[in-house]
Amino acid sequence: MQNFVWTREKPLEIAILISGRGSNMEAILQKIQSGALERVKCALVLADRADAKGLEIARSSGIPAEFLDPGPKKTFLTPEAEKNWVERIRRSGAQLICLAGFMRVLKTDFMDAFAGRILNIHPSLLPKFPGLHVQKRALEAGEAEAGCTVHWVDRGVDSGPILGQRKVPIRPDDTEETLSARILKEEHILYSEVLSGISIGEIPIPAIR
Ligand code: GRF
């Protein structure tokens, strides 16, 4: 693993990885712009789809935002692609990586490069409902509440150490859409809360020893 140094005199620089609409990314960028995340700077936004809406949003905020080829596989970056992604993120100077609706599993090259400094947001109260279609699965399971989780990314799927959660009630008339929208509002608060905690040293970064 490459040496990772971040002294708290400098703002924490992040790279945000997206696949689609990028509303979590947008919420983070807005908090940075408003000064609410004064110790955080966004160095780069990367998307695995050229048509990811979030790319335009990031560019209109003046953030370098690029599509990077993920390779021919649908659910993960190929090893060759991972090497390019690692190289691009290193070049950006980002110390922390935020997955925000990034729909691919990260494998060996990426994890070797950035283990212990990758965050993810997931729309369930982990460890309940890892994986996909989690709002629907929470409804089908008859849960009374749902929510979202920010966690460190490890080599499993949605399985790394949990840093924060926000809960919402599940209502009798909820559909997957209404529940997803209620959770998403909380996601937009939670991600910045956790980033703030990291940027002021309240939450330690595992890759710093
Ligand atoms: C969010 O619900 C996030 O938790 C999940 O994918 C969705 C991405 O939404 N991982 P957006 O692209 O941030 O709007």
Image (cartoon, grey):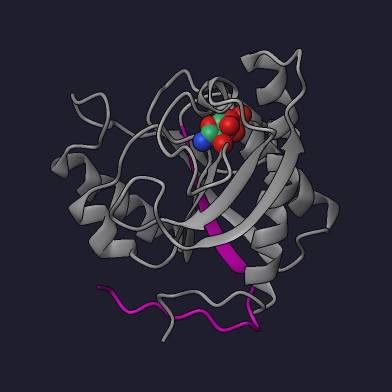
Q: Give how far across and how far down residue 147 sits, in percent.
A: 66, 40
* Main SS of residues in magenta: loop
Q: Quadrant of the C terminus?
A: bottom left
Question: Is the residue 166 above or below the residue 8 in the image?
Answer: above
Is residue 110 part of the magenta span, yes or no? no
The foreground one among 195 and 149 is 149
Question: Is the residue 51 above or below the residue 195 in the image?
Answer: above
| Residue 47 figure quarter | top left
Q: Give how far across and how far down residue 15 sits, in percent.
A: 50, 52
Q: Give how far across and how far down residue 154 sits, in percent.
A: 34, 58
Residue at image point 70% right, 54% down: 192
Residue at image point 28% right, 74% down: 2
Q: Give how far across and how far down residue 28 sits, in percent.
A: 69, 47
From the viewer's perspective, tell me whether residue 33 is left or right of residue 10: right
Quarter of the displayed picture in which ligand 1 can be seen: top right
From the viewer's perspective, tell me whether residue 209 is left or right of residue 165: left
Residue at image point 64% right, 59% down: 41
Is residue 14 part of the magenta span, yes or no? yes
| Residue 172 figure quarter | top right
The foreground one among 129 and 14 is 129
Q: Which residues are magenta?
A: 1-18
The foreground one among 61 and 2 is 2
Residue at image point 60% right, 68% down: 12
Q: Count up the numbered dots.
A: 0
